[in-house]
Amino acid sequence: MYYITWNDEAVIWLFRIVNVILIGFTAKILFSLFVDKLKAPVWLAFLITIMFVFDEKSMDFSINGMETAFMLLGVSLFVRELLSDEKLNPVRIGLIWAFLMWSRPDAFIHIGSILVGYLLFRNRSLPYITTFFRAGVIGVICYIPWVIFAWAYYGNPIPNTVLAKGSLTFSNIIDRGLNYAQYIFTGMVSGDGPFIWIFAPTYYQTGGWPDVLMFVLKWLCYVVVFLWAVPKVNANARFLSFAAFCIASYLIVFSPFIYPWYIPAVTILCMIAFGSVLTQIATSSAATVQVRKWAPAAMVGLAVIVQVWVYTGGLSQMKMQQQLIENGLRKEIGLYLKEEAESNNETVFLEPLGYIGYYSGLTMYDYPGLGNKTIINARKTLGSESYIEIINHIQPDWVVVRPGELRTSKQEHSDQFAHTYTLVRSYDRKPTIENLSIYGRGYLRYDSQFLVYKKNQTDSKKIAYGR
């Protein structure tokens, strides 16, 4: 897009337009899926679609640079294929799988979870397994170009973003898995829960949201994620619920942190499962007329209310995040670095890679190492995750950190950093943020201050760490 427009802002807006189109297609698929495939009442299909359109994380991360809209479209297309009344088409399914894998390198978890749920709860016949095998071959062939590119660019067929975040050991995984199993039960009686993030506001952990809202969201998530365990629930709801449970479990156990742009692909499965069981109630001949009429309407109505509540609160939160943090801090830091750098070959250590890296045009040494392998190699060499140790080791030209991120228990690390770098700029939006009247102010507070350090020019030779 940049080579077409040669304009930074145009690229961002073109990407947003593309994602708006993808979200529109996804909403259309979702509505048609309920009306045509699940035979839901039109009003129910409409309200489930409204739930999707007002999902805060889906909308926010689709317009702000993440792969969210692509994943949502891929998941909805895959589910539509599985619910088709016609014979499953391996070519279409294989292309959808390739599309998902090009969107996210761990999309095979989503594909596998949906497949296992489908075979367990909806159809176990051998011809379907053969169809999925053929689809897998097509998907692999279409995904090979990405593998070749990653291998050539990073020297490893596994994408660098996976390597940067994949620091778990086998014992860590076992411990996290056991803690997760325990957390499922303790979450029922605590204020938090292992699945609340599926419908909860972005970075809800920072606080500042009404307790009653979080309570309703927690139990909505619990119910939907465990629909597969209820025998009388229809097969469609059960297999989709099971898929959501598997993907959620993967994120909880294997991801160092459940990044909010990972979540919408789980959320849309939960929405379809939720709508499927409500359709079952609304069309059941065993239920009374009053139950068929009012129970689904009450449940989906409550879900829509909390979705809109989260959306409107999150809209104010993210609007301020965009104005004060993204444009007011990170973009400004990127432009400052671009102006002050003596060449495009200068390097920057930081954690928030996106805006600063994009607008500066410099080489980013980001933690944990998404942009290149320099930080990954430094972490392995040092056996440490300490920012100041990594900085002293790699000696970047610039350092951009939040206050407190350079804390260390060893004085020699601080002394070496102080000898090598000088504070040249400080950015602070905290006073403005503290005066805002919004939900989730703590999220903005976390990114409200940044310090910019420059390597001393007299320090022309890189100091080897530890000497």
Image: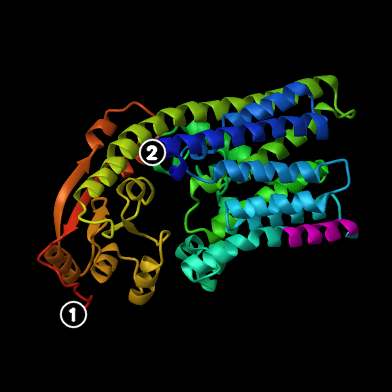
Which residue appears farthest toward the left when viewing the image? Answer: 458
Q: Position of residue 307 (x, y in %)?
A: 56, 30
Which amino acid type is marked by label 2?
Asn
Which amino acid type is marked by label 1?
Arg
Question: Real-space Cα distance between discs 2 and 1?
Answer: 45 Å
Residue to which mark 1 is pinned: 467
Report the residue at 36% width, 60% height from top.
367
Give the side of residue 296 with respect to residue 396, left or right. right
Give the side of residue 399 with respect to residue 272, left or right. left
Report the residue at 58% width, 58% height from top.
105
Q: Which mark is residue 293?
A: none
Q: Position of residue 5 (x, y in %)?
A: 43, 38
Give the side of residue 32 with respect to residue 199, left or right. right
For residue 391, above or below residue 452: below
For residue 319, above or below residue 79: above
Other-residue count near label 2 (Cα within 10 Å), few / some / many at <14 / 14–19 / ≥20: few
The secondary structure that most of the magenta stretch takes on is helix
Other-residue count near label 1 (Cα within 10 Å), few / some / many at <14 / 14–19 / ≥20: few
Helix, strand or loop under label 1: loop
Report the residue at 72% width, 29% height from top.
31
Give the side of residue 307 with respect to residue 393, left or right. right
Report the residue at 66% width, 32% height from top.
27
Q: Which mark is residue 7?
A: 2
Q: Position of residue 123 (x, y in %)?
A: 86, 52
For residue 297, above or below residue 81: above
Q: Is residue 128 magenta?
A: yes
Helix, strand or loop under label 2: loop
Q: Which residues are magenta?
A: 127-138
Q: Quadrant of residue 7?
A: top left
